[in-house]
Image (cartoon, rainbow, N blue to C red):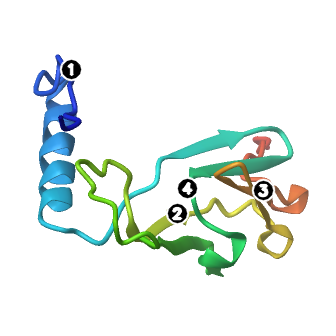
């Protein structure tokens, strides 16, 4: 007896965008693609921006975070290791390989104070705002 993945809604996309995403993601995975795109949440609060990356199975040493002229790039690699050679995989749905995500940051952030922490598969970047570089200004008419 073998294990077979079952999904009753496997080819019923909810939107055209999901259909296109499914096509490219599945095609890349089937062809042995070596990249993946982690899901990201971006949150703004009065004092900072937060970017949360869903990247389970990595160590904090696996990440490379660079800031260049308000252009933030986070990259890394999740390697597939099969330390037990006597196993037969019937399905692998998790993503492995290298990734890179880039973001243009607003002018009102303090790049020198960005900090990162990795906990329970979530990489959290905290990007504080610089109060001196306020983007919104009120101009009085004379």
In the rendering, at what x and y percent does residue 70 appear? Answer: 62, 72
Label 1, on which residue? 14
Task: Tell me how far mark 2 sits from mark 4, CA to CA.
Answer: 17 Å
Q: Nearer the viewer, mark 1 or mark 3?
A: 1
Label 3, on which residue? 126
Q: Nearer the viewer, mark 2 or mark 3?
A: 3
Q: Earlier in the sequence, mark 1 or mark 3?
A: 1
Q: Secondary structure at mark 1?
A: loop
Q: Residues within 10 Å of mark 4 (few under 14, many from 20)?
A: many
Label 2, on which residue? 103
Task: Tell me how far mark 2 sits from mark 3, CA to CA.
Answer: 13 Å
As drawn, is 77 to the left or to the right of 61?
left
Q: Nearer the viewer, mark 2 or mark 4?
A: 4
Q: Quadrant of the N terminus?
A: top left
Q: Secondary structure at mark 2?
A: strand
In the image as oriented, which residue stretches furthest toward the top? Answer: 8
The answer to whether residue 65 is seen in the rendering is no
What residue do we see at 16% from left, 26% from top? 10
> Which residue occupies the foreground of this view, 129 or 16?
16
């Amino acid at each position: 007896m073998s294990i077979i993945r079952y999904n009753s809604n496997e080819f019923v996309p909810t939107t055209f965008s999901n259909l296109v995403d499914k096509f490219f993601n599945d095609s890349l995975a089937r062809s042995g693609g070596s990249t993946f795109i982690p899901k990201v949440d971006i949150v703004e609060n009065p004092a900072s921006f937060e970017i949360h990356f869903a990247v389970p199975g990595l160590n904090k040493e696996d990440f490379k975070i660079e800031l260049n002229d308000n252009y933030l790039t986070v990259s890394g690699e999740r390697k597939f290791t099969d330390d037990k050679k006597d196993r037969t995989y019937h399905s692998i749905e998790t993503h492995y390989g290298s990734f890179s995500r880039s973001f243009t940051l607003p002018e009102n952030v303090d790049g020198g104070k960005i900090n990162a922490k990795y906990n329970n598969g979530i990489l959290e970047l905290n990007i504080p705002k610089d109060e001196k570089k306020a983007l919104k200004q009120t101009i009085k008419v004379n």
